[in-house]
Each structure stands twice: as structure tokens, then as C-alpha cells.
Amino acid sequence: MTETTAKLAPTLPAKGLLRLSPINQRRMENFKSNRRGFWSLWIFLVLFTVCLFAEFIANDRPMIVSYKGEILVPIFIDYPEEKFGGFLAETDYRDPVIRDEISANGFMIWPIIRFASNTINLDLPSPAPAPPTWLQKDSVCAKIAKRTGGSRCADLEWNWLGTDDGGRDVLARIIYGFRISVLFGLILAAISSVIGIFAGAIQGYFGGMIDLYFQRFIEIWSAIPSLYLLMILSNFFQPSFFTLLGILLLFSWVALVHVVRAEFLRARNFDYVRAARALGLSNARIMWRHVLPNAMVATLTFLPFILNGSITTLTSLDFLGFGLPPGSPSLGELLLQGKANIAAPWLGLTGFMVIAVMLSLLIFIGEAVRDAFDPRKTFS
Amino acid sequence: MAPLLYVTNLSVAFAQGGQTTLAVDRVSFEIAKGETLALVGESGSGKSVTALSVLKLLSYPPASHPSGQILFKGEDLISADESALRTIRGNAITMVFQEPMTSLNPLHTIEKQIGEILSIHKGLTGERAKKRILELLDEVGLRDAANRLDAYPHQLSGGQRQRVMIAMALANEPDLLIADEPTTALDVTVQAQILRLLKDIQNRRGMAMLFITHDLGIVRAIADRVCVMTHGKIVEQGKVADIFDQPQHPYTQKLLAAEPKGEPHTVSADAPEVIRTDALKVWFPIKRGFFKKTVSHVRAVDGVTVRIRAGETVGVVGESGSGKTTLGLALLRLISSEGPIAYLGNRIDGIDSNAMRPLRRDLQIVFQDPYGSLSPRLSIADIVGEGLEVQSATLSLEQRREIVAQALIDVGLDPKTMDRYPHEFSGGQRQRIAIARAVVLNPKFIVLDEPTSALDMSVQAQIVDLLRDLQRRRNLAYLFISHDLKVVKALANHVIVMRDGQVVEEGPADAIFTSPQSDYTKTLFAAAFHRDGTQGAA
């Protein structure tokens, strides 16, 4: 048929990456028309991208060093101090001796903030936790400033948001802490969604006994108090980023199961699913092509809120002291310090502001996504 | 005599996303006291919107009235404020809606629902209200009304609910009753009862009625005058007899001629038997108790024997819940059943889904609701070509698209539209797409599960013609499931009448339609054909 007759079918339009189906185009329009959510997404994306490159923004080693005609990249490579005439295994570029040596024989390009998350500022005008430098009186700064040949606070290396009780720069810790929180939240939300969708899909599509037993299992499983379990486990070993992720994952996947299961239960009796069965499609294929797209609407709507939940869980664990290993930059730990040092309000305030802004942005995005997927929503 | 309701130049516009669409365009009509005016048209013609705007029941905005006047007893309803409208709604003008399942509050008893209206408009409460409610329920013919007062809507059948709705509408002795497709969701026999009831009540009370319907048979049975609407305009209005005998406007002529017509093809006596089943049973277990012991069964299909030969159509008729659809699904092994099913002489019951898969290309199905049977997220090419992807996996994408295009031409669609999505098509076009999906695999047997019920009359006739044409060209065997006897008459060679899962009567179509034997078949046919004795000639 295909050779003899003229071509009947129109040629397939070229499929680009960004070619959206009409439904998705409409959703995109709906999303954009929610100004608050749209701007929140951009602000969040900018913040997140910036924080992804935290090492280039806040670091205690320069990005590029030109020393005796040689171009060095300390941000990627550890150079022993011998190279610059010292004796330590790792170079401390903040050391005035090294600094002078390099500037005498070349130059250094520093990140904007010359502190990494765990760099201790040794030139503090007042004992740690020190307030933001711009809040200090010049008389207090004078003694320290003399070391570098200045006399006022402006001549010091600034801690924009002060330091914590270990003398570490709060701004640098926030940049690293934001990154770790969002990454943790994203990974946890992504993996638990995949598991949740899979489990919900199997339950909803097959129904019957599978559904019944799985539901009972989930009910018992979600009755285990995960916070206590974490506390007990953290007595046995020091949780790292990934062990913490694993433990939280054990319980967080349950969140989506009910939604996806309900969608699959509903959709499996749709006529087009029946028609697909009559065409001889396999169950896996029907689930993937016909039912999952329905469930995705509910899932995507839920996702920002799951992401928020994941971030909050990590923060609260850090706050309680059961979270990431000591010394890691984390927002929860900053809050804990704020609680311990009432006299240093910049700790608690910064921690609160960062968490509040981050969660609000995500909620605004979530609301916009929910509206965009709502078929009844009209924007007149 | 001054008309009761006087509508002039009424327009209704809807604003959406910055665009304004005109749903109703300057319609004018009037209803006198005691008169029945039918507003007839196909879906999307604006008839329901017109009726709803009489009581300003649309949501404003997005709806608005760019022009027009609605005078009820000399008072303009368009400019009336909300509190003035409230005294009219449910009191002087009342409404009965199409869907009896959703128009009653499921959490309130019958007594409470009717009592509410009485207490709002008449201040009747307590024993006096109860007495009045009983009177009303008697009037609408709800049997055993005294014991039904405490019933909740789910305890009543569709017809009973519609009676309750009518009782609510009558509670305050309205001057005008607006009935928006009040019988469309009901079975034919119940439809006939409800229509008779409405007519009786109207005669008794002398109230006016605005009756919205798409069914010309009903118009003929109930209305005095009729307005024909299409695309938001009234194209013709006049006395029912005049319009039916001498339609002036081409649209009215088309509408009147749109009854499914034609005769089924004759099947040669030696045509091979495509599918056959003996004493097929589909029993759904009713499970009770902690251990889910099966206590009894719902006998959805109980011992039905069907034989269908190539090129033959077997019509299955019956009311909702009679097991027709279940029978169709069981024949295709889409639900489990008991009893032998043979395809071309080979048993297909009991074989597993892998063995069944290659046979699926020969056994296809078309569903009732063209909106639900197409996945909204796939393009037409994907929907129609999906079966080919599975059944003829060796085809290239280009070849597959060629076959899909051919199938679309076969069902009367433009293959250039194949990359569009279902929502861009009308109901009739969608049903053609669903048929294309079934025929693209070159099947031998198709189950047609009420394929015309969700469609407008004129589209129904087209689909029936299409199905008959496809059958002739491809020698298809059909199992045609429908509650619409006119469509069955136009297609079926052999008819099975089902009730409660069992066959009440079966035989060649001619014999069944000319001389039905069982009482049930007689009532069914009487309800379906009683009002169109003269339509056979049209």
C-alpha cells in the first residue's frame, strides 16, 4: 500500500526538545500567568545555580594563582606549602606570609568571599560569635586592623553576617548550607517520588489482593516513628549525607503512594485503558503510556511540597543534633547556634530568614504548578 | 392574552482568557400560561444556556448578557437584583435538571430536600410541611411515599429521583417549569412514564413549561410549540404540527431527516461463524465479613448464548444494568467469565494473556463515550497507530503512519489532522477516531458498545451509515449493544433482548420488531416507539 499510492500521511513535524503538546503549552501559559510563582521559580533557580558554584563564591583559597610565571588553580588542586616556601602539607593561602610571598612573585584571584564554610577567621575584633563587621565600632576593630596596617573596621576582612561561635563566616556557611539542603531535598524528593509512583502504580493498577496487602504493609510501615529510629541509629554510627538520605528514604516514599494509587485505581477503568487492553497492549505499556500521565498531574502538584518536607526534615534533624556530621554547613545547625547564643541575634535571624525565604519560594512555585495543572482553572 | 414569559433579543456571551464567545445570539420567544414550548437543538446549540439565563443561573462573570430582555409577568429579570431573583427561583419559576444522580444532595433525606423549599418560600415547617410533602410525592407518583420520606437519594432509582426532583419543582406551585433534558439520563420505559407525568401535572395545574431536549420524538409527544436552535440562534419556531409537517429552514429539515435509517445487510446462509459462546456466565462475587467469604453473586450475565457470523450484526438491547456491556467485554475476554467462547471455531476462553495477544487484532471494541475512550494526551496518529505498534512491530514509523492515514480516510476523516489531539475534535469525529482505532488492525469482529448514544441525532445517523459501510466492505461481524431501538433496527440482523443478565427474547430482527413475544419486549418497544407512530414515514 505504501509503495503504490501517493503518500497519505503528512510528514511528521520535526521534534525539537522544546516542542510542547497543546495541553502543556496551555499549562505553561497558566504557570506564567501566576506572576508570583513564576518569579519565585526564577529567584529560586538563580539562588540555586549560584549556590551550586559555592566554591567559586566563598572559599579560603584563591581560584587562580600566578606564582613565578606558573599558573596554579588551588580551587581544584591542593598544592603543598613547600611550593611557596612553607612547610605545611596543604597551603594556607590566608596566611599573611604566603599571601605576601605570592603577591611578591605574581598575583592571586580570590572568590568574592575569602572564607569557606569551615574557615575560622583568626582576625576577629571581638570574641566569637562576632557580630557583622559593619556593626562593629572602629575602636574595637583598631587593634586587629593594625595587623594589616589599617585602623578602622573597613580595613578588615568583612564578615557580612558575622561569625558563628566557632569563628566561621555565617554568609559562607549559608551559601554552602543552602546548597546542601536543596540538594538533599531534591535527591530525597526525586528518589522517594520514583519509588512512591512505582509502588502506587502497581497497587492501583492491579488492585485486589496486591493492593490489600500492600496497603496493610504501608499502614504498619508508616506507623514506625522515623525520628526515634534516626536518633537510635545515630547513636551507633555517625550519619553521613548518604546514610541520612537512605534512612529518610525508607519512610518518605510512602507520601506519594496514596495519591498515585488513587489515580491508577480510577484510570484503570477508563474506556481508553480498556481499549488499549483490547488492542493487546501489555500491562507495563498501558501503565506507562495511558495511566501514568494522569497520575503525573497529581504527582507534580505534590512534588514541591514533598521537596519542602524533605528540606525541613534535614533542618530539624540538624537542629536536634542528629543530622549531618559536626562541622558540616547546615541551616539547622545555624538555628541551633542561634538558640544557644541568644546574645548573637544575627545567627538565629539569618538562619530563620534563609529557611523562610527558601520554603516560601518553593511553596509559591508549588502553588503555581498546582494551578497550571488544574484543568478547571481559568484565567480571565 | 399577555405571555407569561417574554424573551426578546437575548444574547449570552462567555469571556475566557481575554476572548468572548457568543453562546446565544439574539433569541426571542414567548410562553403563554399553560403552554409547553420545546427548545430543541443539538449539543452546543445554546439551548441549556438560554434556559439557565432565564433564572440567571449562569455564573456572572464569565457570562454576560450583551443584549436582551427577559420579561416574566412584566418584570425584567435581566436587571433584577439577586434578592428579587431569589423570590422567583424555586417559587414562580422552577427547574428540573438532566442528571438525577447529581441534582439531589446525597446527604439529605427526601423529606429534608423538599421541606427546605417549602420553608424558604412558604414558611411551612413541621407537620404541615410533612403533609404537603406527602401530597407532592403522591402527585408525582412515587409509590409508598410515606415510607420513603426518610430515604436518601442513593436508595432511589434514577426514575424515582427524577420524580423527587419534579416534586421539588412543583412544591411552590410554579407558573413556569423549566425542564432541561429531564429524561435523557433515564431508560426508555422510565422516560415514557416521566413524560406522561409531566404532561398530566401540566394539564391539572395549567402551568407553563419550557422543555429543553434534543429528542424530536419527545417534542412531538409533549410540546405545543417548538423553537429550533442551532449555533446560538433560533432558526425556526412555530406550532409543533406545522414544523414537523412543513419544516422551512434547511437545518430543521436536516434535523427531521436525521433519524438513523436504512436496512441491515443480508447475510448469506453459508457465512462462517466468527464468534460463538454457549451459556456464558459473568458472576461477580459479593464478599462479606473479615475473611471475605463469598456469600452470593451478582449475575451480570447469566447463561447467554450468542452466535455471530461474518458480515452479520447481532443487536443486544436492554435497559441499563441488564448486562449488555458486560456481555460484550466478556466476549473479548476483557473481563473473566465462565463458559466456552470460540473464535473461528477455536476456544479462546482459558488461554492466557500472552496467547490472547495475537488474537486481539481480530477482536476489537468501540466504546460509548467518545470523550472518555481517547487518551487526551496522545495525538490521533498515536491513538490509532498504537495497536499497530504492538501487533505489527516490524513496521517502520513511516509505514505505520501510512496505514493510520488510510484508516482515517476509511472513517471519513482528513489524514492531515492526524497529529492533532482529541480535544480539537467534535464528538462525532472522536467516535470516528475510535472506530478508526478498531478497524486499523483489520479485525474480523467488533463489539460496538453504544457507539451512538453520546452523539447528536444527525451525527448518529452518519455513524450508523459509516458502520454499515465498513461492514459491507470488510465483511465485519458486529455485536451491537444499544438501548436505542431505532439504531438497532437500522443495523441488526439478529436481536437479543436482555434483562437482568438473561435473554428475554431473541430472534431475527424483522420478527422481533414486527411481533415481539414477551411482555418485557412489548413494553420496551412501546416506550421507544409509541410517540413516533408517524415518524416511520418521514
Image (tube, rainbow, N blue to C red):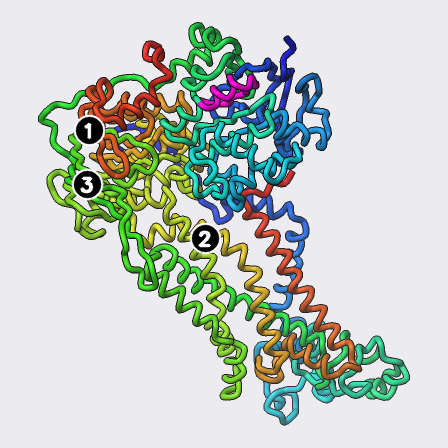
Secondary structure beneath label 2? helix
Chain holding disc 1:
B
Question: Foreground: B349 or A276?
Answer: B349
Q: Which mark is residue A295?
A: 2
Quadrant the C terminus of chain A occupies: top right
- Chain bearing mark 2: A
**In the rendered image, is residue B194 in sight?**
yes
Quadrant of the rendered structure where residue B127 is?
Answer: top right
Q: Is B206 inside the magenta-drawn segment?
A: yes
Three-letter amino acid code at the position of disc 3: Gly
Q: Position of residue B302 (x, y in %)?
A: 22, 42
Q: Amino acid at mark 1?
A: Glu
Q: In this view of the protein, which residue sits in the foreground, B120 or B76?
A: B120
- Between the residue at mark 3 and the residue at mark 1, the CA separation in whole angstroms equals 14 Å
- The residue marked by circle 3 belongs to what chain? B
Marking on residue A374: none
Tag count:
3
Tell me if residue A233 is in the magenta stretch.
Answer: no
Q: In the rendered image of this protein, does residue A206 appear above or below residue B347?
A: below
At label 2, which amino acid type do we have? Ala
Instruction: Describe the element under mark 3 as helix, strand or loop.
Output: strand
Which mark, by number, is residue B506?
1
The stretch of residues the image draws in magenta is B197-214
Q: Position of residue A154 (x, y in %)?
A: 85, 77
The label on residue B303 is 3
Q: Residue A33 location in percent, x, y?
A: 64, 45
Q: Nearer the viewer, residue B313 or A144?
A: B313
